[in-house]
Image (tube, helix red, strand yellow):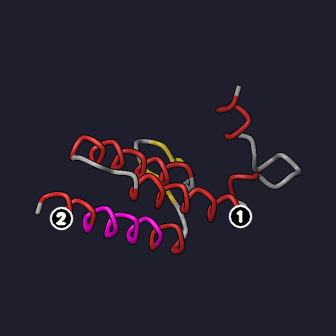
Amino acid sequence: MFMNLFRSRSSFPLRSPWNSPLFVRDTYKKCLKVIDSCENLEHIKSTEKYIGNFLTMHSEYLGLGQYETDEFILKSYGRLKEILTEKRNNLDG
């Protein structure tokens, strides 16, 4: 049901809540909290998947494994990856 609603959202008269700047901000903050809570390398691996879900959630699926998103989401994703790399380096040594 969710996927059908998502695919037809362009014909749906209301704006999708997933495109809201407040939703993007809140999911970004949640990613930061997840990164901050990492205590070992297993947590880091799971957090990498979580950050990948951040990008997928705020992107549009075009088909054949391709997604499209705007510049702001890509910069946010890149920053999250940098913060996670810093966290991994702090845990390693």
Q: Is residue 21 above or below residue 58?
A: below
Quarter holding the C terminus? bottom left
**x and y, in percent, of residue 72 in the image:** 54, 74
Figure disc tally: 2
Left or right position of 58 against 22: left
Amino acid carrying label 1: it is Leu
**Residue 22 part of the magenta-drawn span:** no
Instruction: Say which mark, if any, is on residue 8.
Output: none
The residue where tag 1 is placed is: 22
Question: Residue at (68%, 58%) from the top-left corner?
Answer: 23
Residue beneath the point at 21% across and 46% down: 41
Q: Seen from this angle, which residue lies furthest left?
A: 93
Crowding near pointer 2: few (<14 within 10 Å), some, many (20+)?
Answer: few
* Residue highlighted by disc 2: 89
Q: Main secondary structure of the magenta part?
A: helix
Give 67 or 35, whichever is nearer the viewer.
35
User: Magenta segment, which residues?
Assistant: 76-86
Question: Gap in Å between the C-alphas at discs 2 and 1?
Answer: 31 Å
Query: Can you say which quadrant of the picture contains the N terminus?
Result: top right
Disc 2 or 1, which lies upstream in sequence?
Answer: 1
